Every structure is written in structure tokens, then in C-alpha cells.
Amino acid sequence: MVIRFGRSLLDHVVLFLCGYFCLQVLVRLLTTPGLVIDESEQMLLTQSFALGYNAQPPLYTWMQMLFFHIFGPGILALTLLKNLLLGLAYLFTYLAGCRLTDNRRTAALAALSLLLLPQIVGEAQVDQIHSVLVTTAAATTLYLLIRLLQGGTTALFLWIGVTVAAGILAKYNFLLMAVALLLSSCLIPEYRRILLRPPLVLTVLTAVLLVAPHAFWVLSHPDLASAETLERMQLHQSSGYLANVWRGTIDLLVATLAFVGPFLGVCLLVHRSPQPFQLNPQARLLGGFIALSLLLIFLVILATETTQIKQRWLQPFLFAFPLLFFLVRPAAEPLQLRTALIPTLATATGLIVTAVIPLRIYLVDTFDEPRRDNYPFRALAQTINADGFAEGLIITEDKFIGGNMRLFFPDATVITPSLPLQPYQLTPQLLVVWQHFDPVTMIDQENLDAYRCRSYRVELPFRHSQTFSYQVRYRICRQKEGSGTDGN
């Protein structure tokens, strides 16, 4: 029975992935009416088009603007875009596997094994956006490169330039992925002859032209584009260079093992290959790519004294690890019981995670503190609306509150100090919302004097909680008669 189920999964992997990600969308729509951090940020950034916004590249925001235009600003558009991108990452991993292994079941095994990587099956669903997009760009670039190396047309050089640009505009660490993939290809003579030809200039020019507008924005806003990322990378720095490098190197090793460990553990326990280790050019390509990626990250550690490596930063490199594993240790044909356990366990893991993520929302009182999903923003918006605010300019303490305010006041413009370049126009009504510090100083005192304000303080229970409550303050301001408006 396990063999039959595993074979059915592998033979219908695309259909399974479509159903799986439709289920993710449905579960999210049914269980969570509010936004988490990255989603809140997107609700704010998509209020206006710009070549850059903050420390993250702008491509995801541009795509989210398109989805908001089609489906309206809300959870449906946010969830559809993320799960579409996740589904494409799995799909292009499968297609790359088909090309590399010439065996659809082995390719399907590698694609389904992404469900055994906790960072992808769990964290990507909880609160990731840019990491999801860069992983999709990485999988697409890998697939196109493999097609090119197997005798594809010159047009593939152009398309690789497009996906490289998309990856860089998704997350800057994609540059390391592109360099590692190029170097790995050049280390294999038969691939080097195909790749190092005049059409490669087309790839470079395409990528440069597409990235150039944002690159000019980065040069104009160097602190905004890099300060936050460098601060995260250099967290817990000590005074000594060697100590910082040592801490960063250990963190890289721990993050790498944590990323691939569960998958590797399952495969070492249940997978048996009848063939010796395969070190064909395809395996050397992927193995070299992953090794060179980690080496480049180590060089970044040496250059910047990075002390913290987050697992999500490794996604555009280590998503290919299951594919490499099954290239080196191919599955037996016909499918054996041990190997059939892998897609079965992967599917079970995906479904369990799908159930656990929303279950944590309902079990909030068993944890030390509420989750972002438990914040009572719908009830807060209803309370504010009952006190007389319907639309206008909203000023919030942070982007988490701000994004949720825009969700429930879709006709309002929301600004926050944590996103300093947002354009806005003063309106007859203002709403100021905060929990710890009052952000009203974003408005010049001269303009603020044109308003008459009333302050409120409310305490609301967190969703599904009998223990925790959310204390928040807000101020509703109405413009005095005869006063004009100003903007920024």
C-alpha cells in the first residue's frame, strides 16, 4: 500500500502540488483575518510605486501591487501571490530534476522532498515573502541553465538574464547564487564550452539593464538600502575580528545543518540505492554550486565580520540539496518500499505543518505570549470606526499596526516612521494609532495645529485568548474650519 501510494504521488506530482497550495490558500483565508509582519509591510509599500523602498529590493512589492489591482488589497491577494511563487519553486525544481536525471519519478522525489526542509515547508508559509521570491528565481534560473547546457537555443541566454535580474530584484544575496552557478558550470569542461560563448554577453546586458533603475536608487539611498541588513548580519559582534569571524562561521555551519538535517536524516534512515555513488557532470554541477555558494558566504563573513546567518538566507542555495542527493544516490526502479516512504513522509509532513500553523492560533493561551495572528485588529478597527473615523490619513507606530489598519481601512493612506519615504497628503480626518510611542511627530506641528484631536485608550482580548489582552491608544483628529491641507 505504501509503495502504491508513493508511486501515485510521484506519478502525479504536479497535480498534488496544485492541490497542496490551493489548500494553503484556503486554510489561510479561513483561519487568519489579520496580517503578519512582512504582509503588513507590503500593504504599506504598495500604496505607491517607487524604484526602491527600504533594505529589500522592490520586485515583490511591484508584483504585489499587480495582484492588489486584480484582486483588491487584502489577504486573498497576499496569499495567492505567495503560494503561486512557492508552487513555481517546487515546479521548477521538478522540471530541473527531469532534465538532470532523465527520470520523472526521481525528479518528483526531489521536488516533494522540499517538504522535508523546515525552512521551506513551514517558515515560508508563516512570514516570508522576499525569500520565497528569490527561491523561485533560483529554481527557475537553474532549470533554464540546465536546458541551455543540454543544447538549448540562444534565446535561453536572454531568459537567464531575465531570471537573474528577477533574483537580484527579489533579494540581493541572489548575486552569490548567480556567481556560484556560473563558476560551477565553468569548472566542468563540457559545460564551459557551451556557456562561455558570445551570447553570454546577452545574459549580462539583459540583467544589467533590468536591474539598473533600482541600482541607481540604491546609490542614491545607500543607508536606507543597506543599514538594516548589515545590522542583522553583524548582530552580537564582539571587539575582535577573529571572534566575529569564528561566530559567523559556526552560525553558517549550524544554519546549514539545520536547513538540510531533517531531509538528510529521513533519507539516510530509509533510502537505499542499488547503484554506487554517481558523480556525473550533472551531480558535479549541483554539488559545485552548493559548495561554492557556501564558500562565497564564508568570504562575506570574512569581509564584513558577519556574526549571524539566518536559515532563510540559505534558501536560494540549499533548495537544490534534495536534487543533488538523488543525483548522487538515485532511487531504484521499480520503486522500493524504503524509497516510497520518502514521498509519503514528505506529504504527511506538509499536511501536518498545514494543520499546526493555524492550530497555534487557537492554542494561544498555552504559549508565553500571543502570536502575530492573534492580534485583534478587526475588533480595533470596528472600535475606531464606531468612534467616528472612516477614512483619511492614518499614522501608526510601526508597519505591523499600519498594514493591519490599511487592511481594515482600505480607502485610507497609512504612513509610519519605520518606512520614511512614503508620500502622503493631509486629509480632513487623521487617525494616529500606537502602543508604545506616539508617532504623531511625523506631522509638522504647524500642520497639526490645524486639527482638533480626541484621544482614546482601549484594551481588547487577543483572538482566541482568555488570558492575553491588547492595550492600544489612538487619536482621532478633525480639521478645524477654514484650515487647509498640506502634503509630503
Image (tube, rainbow, N blue to C red):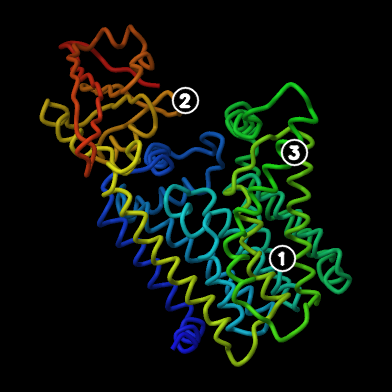
Q: Which residue is mark 2?
A: 420
Quarter assignment of residue 318? bottom right
Tag on residue 157?
1
Q: Visible in this render: residue 159?
A: no
Q: Which quarter of the figure is the C terminus placed in?
A: top left
Front position among marks 2 and 1? 2
Q: Which residue is mark 3?
A: 301
Q: Earlier in the sequence, mark 2 or mark 1?
A: 1
- Where residue 63 appears, as percent x and y from the top left, is 46, 52
Q: Is residue 62 above or below residue 85?
A: above
In the picture provided, is 108 more to the left or to the right than 202?
left
Q: Is residue 210 above or below residue 436?
A: below
Q: Residue at x 59, y 83 (%)?
A: 104
Q: CA distance from mark 1 to mark 3?
A: 32 Å
Q: Earlier in the sequence, mark 3 or mark 2?
A: 3
Where disc 3 sits, the SS reads helix
- Callouts 3 and 2 close, C-beta under 8 Å: no
In the picture provided, is 281 more to the left or to the right than 139?
right
Front position among marks 3 and 2? 3
